[in-house]
Amino acid sequence: MCFSAEASFAASGVLAASSVAIARVPKEKASIPLSLFPAIFATHQFIEGILWLNQDGVLPDSYKAAAVYAYALIAYVLWPIFVPFAVYMSEPERSRRAVMLLCQAVGLGVGLWLLVGNGTTPLDVSAHCCSLSYSVNAPPMLIVPYLLAVSIPFLVSSRKGMVLFGLALTGSCAAAAIVASAPTFPSVWCFFAAVLSGGLYLHFRAAAQTDAHRHGMSAHTGTVAG
């Protein structure tokens, strides 16, 4: 599977539009962190587009170091910490929130480990088999905790839309493992996950429609009772 600057910029544009659409949907304040996913992924794909332009010789190396660190910060540090937090905030059931808190602890440990491990380590990126391969200090022992932190919160959610997103995210991980080589797996999976995040608009729209219907029924019941 081949990727390019055009693919990354196109994904970034679509996700930016999706984030604007989500922002226009009425929602609870607790769901705001979750609503930021497409915007963060849009930024992530824009950064990768810049790195593709560097690999293609369009942009000079002066852009490379900052872009690589920004990409790694989002992929390796932000997501394992932010995903459990965002899903936890939008979850109403206490027992499920307890599981998400455990995932939060795992994700916090993984994120901080990778932050410290890469804070003083030179990072690099290169094109490999039509994808980007990032040279990052990420010990293999952190793969499983990372996957647990970013997938389990969705899978244990009481909201159907979140469970479906978690299943799609897990499936995209498996797909990336099949189509990508080991060095390019992080980049390919991030692209797949980014595309999937645009579908969160459907979750927020469905939730808004459910809330509107519930409020409408409540108002109707109150009128009849009066």
Image (cartoon, rainbow, N blue to C red):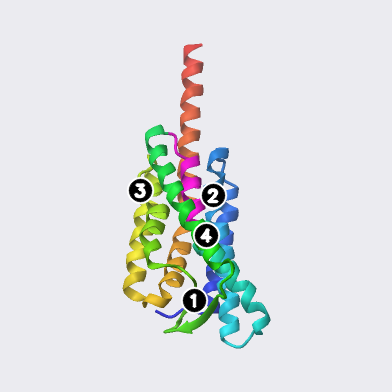
Give the quadrant of residue 27: top right
Towards the viewer: 156 or 22: 156
Towards the viewer: 114 or 162: 114
Query: Dots 4 and 3: beta carbons under 8 Å?
Result: no
Give the quadrant of residue 14: bottom right
- Label 3, label 1: how far apart the Cα atoms are: 30 Å
Magenta stretch, residue numbers: 79-92
The residue lying at 47 percent from left, 12 percent from top is 225
Residue under label 4: 77
Tag 1: Cα neighbours inside 10 Å, few (<14), some, or many (≥20)?
A: some
Mark 3 residue type: Leu
Disc 1, SS: strand
Q: Is 109 situated above or below 224?
A: below
Disc 2, SS: helix
| Mark 3 vs 2, N-terminal side | 2
- Label 3, label 2: how far apart the Cα atoms are: 18 Å
Mark 2 residue type: Ser
Residue under label 2: 35
Q: Picture coordinates of residue 130 (x, y %)?
A: 44, 83
Residue 135: image tag: 1
The residue lying at 59 percent from left, 64 percent from top is 43
The answer to whether residue 115 is seen in the rendering is: yes
